Amino acid sequence: MAQSFKVVQYGIGPIGQSCLRTILTKNNHIKLVGAIDIDPNRVGKDVSEILGLDAPVGVQVSADAEEVLSRTKPDVVVHTTSSFLARMYDQLVLCAKHGANVISSTEELSYPFDRHPEIAKELDLVARENGVTILGTGVNPGYAMDALALMATGVCNEVRSITINREVDAGLRRLPLQQKVGAGITAEQFAEKKATGMFGHIGLVESIRLIADGLDWSIDRIEEHLDPVISPREVITPFLTVKEGSVAGIHHHAYAYDGEELLLTLDLKMFVGAEDPRDAVKVDGDPPMDLVVRGGIFGDTATVATLINGIPQTFHAQPGLQTVKDVPLVRAFGTR
Amino acid sequence: MAQSFKVVQYGIGPIGQSCLRTILTKNNHIKLVGAIDIDPNRVGKDVSEILGLDAPVGVQVSADAEEVLSRTKPDVVVHTTSSFLARMYDQLVLCAKHGANVISSTEELSYPFDRHPEIAKELDLVARENGVTILGTGVNPGYAMDALALMATGVCNEVRSITINREVDAGLRRLPLQQKVGAGITAEQFAEKKATGMFGHIGLVESIRLIADGLDWSIDRIEEHLDPVISPREVITPFLTVKEGSVAGIHHHAYAYDGEELLLTLDLKMFVGAEDPRDAVKVDGDPPMDLVVRGGIFGDTATVATLINGIPQTFHAQPGLQTVKDVPLVRAFGTR
């Protein structure tokens, strides 16, 4: 490849800031040309101030996305603003209209064709019209519970069903993740949060649709369940304490059927005190596959990696709205 | 995808016959239109006779590749004739000139740019001129010790080195594989075979070059070693007996350096009596990755799967000589 990409970071919350740090370490391969965020506490500051670096980076945070995109003409925008497609659809369109490819952590963008068919169609159209690629990725959805499973099936002649287990020790993760999974709250509070419909992991359905599309499988029913993991003991993290009998985290699981046949099982546990963190893919097939990432894939770092590592593929892919199954295998980028 | 591909099977030795069996089970997705082989015992026979099937398939084996390709105009040729590129270069050119994409198990084709730069250049040219893709794949090289490792690095921001261990229980494999690894011979016989330079696994160097190219890493020295695995006990397989103290199989290992820095370790053991068969990839990186396929990837079946599963990618890829890192993630194809 031996190519350098001009990149704008769009969204500089915790994940965006980690992206910026990684981008700055790969300055032989990536040139940071802009940073967009609407937070008044960030706007106007040099990126180094946000990251707590000594030397100025020479890139100021701006809230004016249009101005940044027009002026800097990035090859790729690394986009980390929201989990929900409807909220940031305009941002993607703006990037595309400025001729910038986009790689985004937006969970719903990893496979938008099912949940948001109209938006997906429009994004695909605007991307094609402007000759750019829009790609949603991340560690989950985008890798651990979908791309890795598809990869596992690559050596199978027959596949009857796939079971994917991801267990994450939330105690090792940052505070927002521990809060996101409800660590430390009561079962009643968990039930209230669940009732809002805005709680739990976003992406199991996207992962299911991505796998099914990749295998050209028809799915006619998806069941999704969200339960609390109740802590059997007191667990203390650097950020909070989970008492015995209170919520340690989430158990989010989904099942995809064709008729009565169970084809896909996605089982995600993210909780404080997990003793066997891992990512496992079992393929019931010929040959069978029993793949495990021991210790699991460390989400915070890995999410950033999927975004930065996907920059070359996003740049080189065919124009349009793509998914991780449509682009060449994403591997580490700019590591030496 | 929901597409059917016209396929010619080129080479119907053991792997080619397994490909044929798999192709015939996927007849909603693949239409077998021709079969090429030079063995006089096979030529003129219906494919069903070679495979021992009851009902005729309606495709006769022919030694006249040119006639088969002209008449059947396949979308993709599944090519399984030789491990060595120089021996089958003409076959690939013939396919390309007939407008047929080729997916091949030829080990040296998985990454031909280093060992055979001139042939690689010519193949790429003839493929582009004829608007077809030529892709070399297989389980090893092509998946277990290269593509899977690249996939593992996809979630890493930093990669310092990669260690890949593949341990295969040759006792579970077909006779030619047991013979190929020298099971049952003496250490002296092993040394003689090794001296011919035509013994051991083919592909470690190809896998190294594929990973290094995928990561854009510079490698200035590769060390390759081939040692016997001496059996500590008598082992009896359905085909042969390995006595205590005789050769159980091969230990083939290779190391890639940049200066004094060891970047890649590929360690392959294929022997009768292996007690911990597995495929393992360890990435020393940020985050680290510790990926294991427990029980290992069953080579005979998996090699066939990589070829058949790669048919859609080979058909849709950009014209030219491609590698598994250049095409979208190969996953199971035609399983339902």
Image: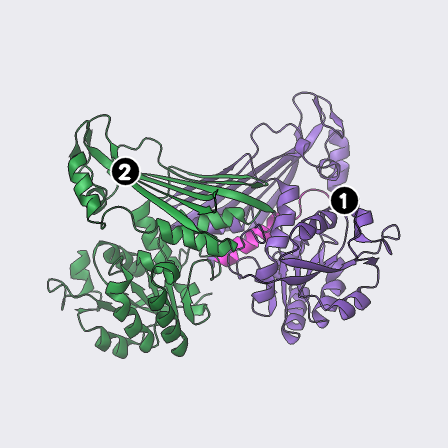
Chain colours: A purple, B green
Helix, strand or loop at mark 2: strand
**Residue projecting furthest to the front:** B259
Q: Residues within 10 Å of mark 1 (few under 14, many from 20)?
A: few
Marks 2/1: CA distance? 63 Å
Which residue is labeled 1 in the image?
Answer: A196
Question: In the image, what residue occupies the spot 77% across and 54% down?
Answer: A57
Return the x and y of residue B153 as percentages of the image width and height.
53, 47
Depth check: A181 or B191 in front? B191
Return the x and y of residue B304 as percentages of the image width and height.
32, 54
Depth check: A299 or B4 in front? A299
Is residue A188 in the magenta section?
no
Q: Which residues are magenta?
A: A198-214
Image quadrant where one finds the N terminus of chain A? bottom right
Helix, strand or loop at mark 1: loop
Left or right position of B219 against B187: right
**Is the stretch drawn in magenta largely helix, strand or loop?**
helix
Return the x and y of residue A288 as percentages of the image width and height.
38, 43
Residue B227 marker = 2
Same subunit, tags 2 and 1: no
